[in-house]
Amino acid sequence: AQDAGDYTCSVGDQQTTASLKVKVLPVLFNKELKNVESEEGGTAVLHCEISKPDAPVEWKKGGVVIQPSAKYEMKLRGNVAELIIHGVEPDDC
């Protein structure tokens, strides 16, 4: 972390030094994903809320990482991560 390190306070020829260690908090889910339904050919939106704004988010389907494409659109606005699936097909389930 940028703020970690040694800090010194000086008065005349006297000084005292302390070390600051910053404990990085894990990213947690404030709101988890919920099941959604969509009509064939429609658009489905999955969203969740994370505890740390703009933290890196990875989306997977069946254990495989989803890449952005015409079908899959990923958005991250502050604490909210969205996966938008365009042209939903039965195979997308």
Image: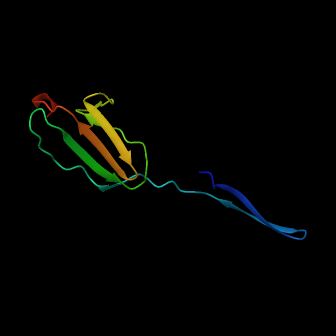
Q: Nearer the viewer, residue 57 or 23?
A: 57
Q: Say which of 92 and 26 sits in front.
A: 92
Quarter assignment of residue 68: top left
Taking 18 as reference, is 33 left or right? left
Residue 4, position in %: x, y? 64, 55
Residue 25 as seen in the image, left or right of residue 2? left
Position of the C terminus, as image quadrant, is top left
Q: Quadrant of residue 10?
A: bottom right
In the rendered image, the vertical position of residue 33 relative to residue 10, given as above or below: above
Which residue occupies 37% across, 42% down? Answer: 57
Q: Is residue 4 above or below residue 57?
A: below
Question: Where residue 67 sits in the image (x, y, percent)?
Answer: 33, 29
Q: Residue at x 38, y 53 (%)?
A: 79
Give the number of marks.
0
The answer to which of 21 and 50 lies nearer the viewer is 50
Q: Nearer the viewer, residue 85 or 67?
A: 85
